[in-house]
Amino acid sequence: MADLLEAVSAEAAGASPHGARLLALALREQGVTTLFTLPGGHILQLLDACRDEEIRVIDTRHEGAAVLAAEGWALATGEPGVAAVTAGPGFANGLVGLLDASAWSVPLLMIAGRTGYSRQGRGAVMDVDQRAIAAPAAKWAATCYEAGRAGQYAAQALHVARSGCPGGAYLEVPWDVMRTAPAPLDVTPGGYPDQPARPAAAPADIGAALAALARARRPLIVAGSGAFWSGAGEEIAAFAEEASIPVITASAARGVVADSHPWSLGSLVHGGVALPSADCVLLLGSAFNANVLYGAPPLFGAEQTVIQVDVAAERIGGNRLPEVPVVGDVAQVVRDLRAAWRGGSSEGAAWLEQARGLVRASLGFWDQQIDGHSGSQLHAGRVARETAAYVRERFGGDITLVADGGDALAWALGYFPAERPGSLLTTTTALGTLGVGMPFALASGAAHPGTPTLLFTGDGSFGLTAMEVDTAVRHGLPIVVVVSNNAGWGDVRHEQDAFFGPGRHVASELAATRYDKLGEALGAVGEHVDRIEELRPALDRAFDSGRCTVIDVTTDPTVLAELLRIMGSAGLM
């Protein structure tokens, strides 16, 4: 807060800082290095102040993409993402990111300009009661009416967004507050801790969890998104080794324990096949939501002992009552479990091999879907599998993979590896928001400039934010985009076939657009692939070019991943 107080006191010397300057100062003091935006009159003062405070400003082509990119920044780094949008329609466009972040418990700050206080309710252009709209979707929402408190509000918003169970915070600042010099403040310095609190669990709960794990012969660890926000990967990996417990990673936690780790079963897509055989499940940082089939069969067994660990007491239980509830920070809880572990009755290596056999069987089922394909066009799964093999061979785990779409996403979930936290960003949020691919890829490229980023996306979802190729080009982000182009909303078409009979496709067909040509028009490199033999050379050229590249791959519209059929029958929507 020292810079903020200095800036306010500078008014007496004639420097006249304004509310936007204090806002930018607070962002910088809280460690914010990058802000995503689409400019508009209500936030111009803030954008200019960010330049003075050396906060990088990345401007997108749509406010929705800006806020989604801020969400992607959080998922790629573990730190809160920040976006700024102008009032009215700018605010409305950005809401999708705030909704997604709050539903998926991602720490995000959406700053919105607002009509000047003196003109609100008078029919001013772009005037709408934004906070009333945002509040139900946000973890925290506020309006700053005093220039001198702008920095305090920003610090509070970021603190709330990342503390406890993370979420989206909304802060609106009217135009006249942005540009007004603050009144002199005579207050003691405020502020918030540099890092959120890491509450430990009650010793009795730790003891109950230890007892359940010690009795288990076939225990499993399932690490959910809370494990990522807690930074618990190293603790989980160490505990898995010491206690001989296999680990599955899901959602934002993909990669917190590397897929290549000796006790890792990889993703829930394949590792989940072993879940019903476990007699005890340690669920770390996940609610019993659709991503884990509500904690019910066929993913979870009805007779299992379930230990649910979460930092937020209100997230314990619900669709399933855990036998052992533990409220505490995931990393701290696992650290305490490790410290007190004295061994158990786990079948150890034999159980690990049994579980791995089930994972191999699941992978084999996916391979059969691809290898049994006889169509003349490429199977989307084959493109995803070949892309995954390529990046493993060329980059190992030193790459960020992004996946977006319906059928394309399913194949990516089945084959894409995750070797470090924040290295696999996907459309697996509570909302299932499509169009996150390009914004997430922008964020990854900006957050990790020395690490390559590849986006695998369906043509439908790509179209929602395709203009962000222009953003990547302008900001020098060499994102490689692989578009699985089946000329339509593939999963929707197959649902229509199932519901109404073959061929009754309403609003689900798209043109066979050459997205490589769109990429070229926006300044990117374009590649087109019709045969699998052409894919690796195209990927080589894309990564070697050091430029944003769009690889358009023609894929078979008749293909649908069995995962989507299973999800449809499981009632996840």
Image: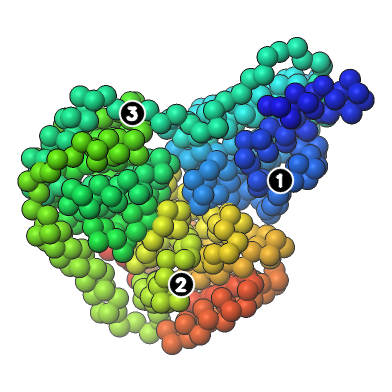
Please tell me whether mark 1 sits on a helix, a strand or a loop. Answer: loop
The residue at which mark 3 appears reads as: 200
Q: Earlier in the sequence, mark 1 or mark 2?
A: 1
Q: CA distance from mark 3 to mark 2?
A: 38 Å
The residue type indicated by label 1 comes to Ile
From the image, tell me which residue sits under label 2: 395
Left or right of residue 47: residue 137: left
As drawn, is 6 to the left or to the right of 96?
right
Near-viewer residue (100 or 360): 360
Query: In which quadrant is the C terminus drawn?
Result: top left
Q: Nearer the viewer, mark 1 or mark 3?
A: 3
Q: CA distance from mark 1 to mark 2?
A: 30 Å
Residue named by callout 1: 55
> Few, some or many C-alpha atoms within 10 Å of disc 1 (few <14, some 14-19, many ≥20)?
many
Spot occupied by residue 489 in the image (x, y as percentages of width and height): 45, 62
**Mark 3 Cα-neighbour bin, 10 Å: few <14, some 14–19, many ≥20:** some
User: Left or right: where does residue 198 sit relative to residue 276?
Assistant: right
Say whether residue 491 is visible. Answer: no
| Residue type at tag 3 | Ala
Q: CA distance from mark 1 to mark 3?
A: 35 Å
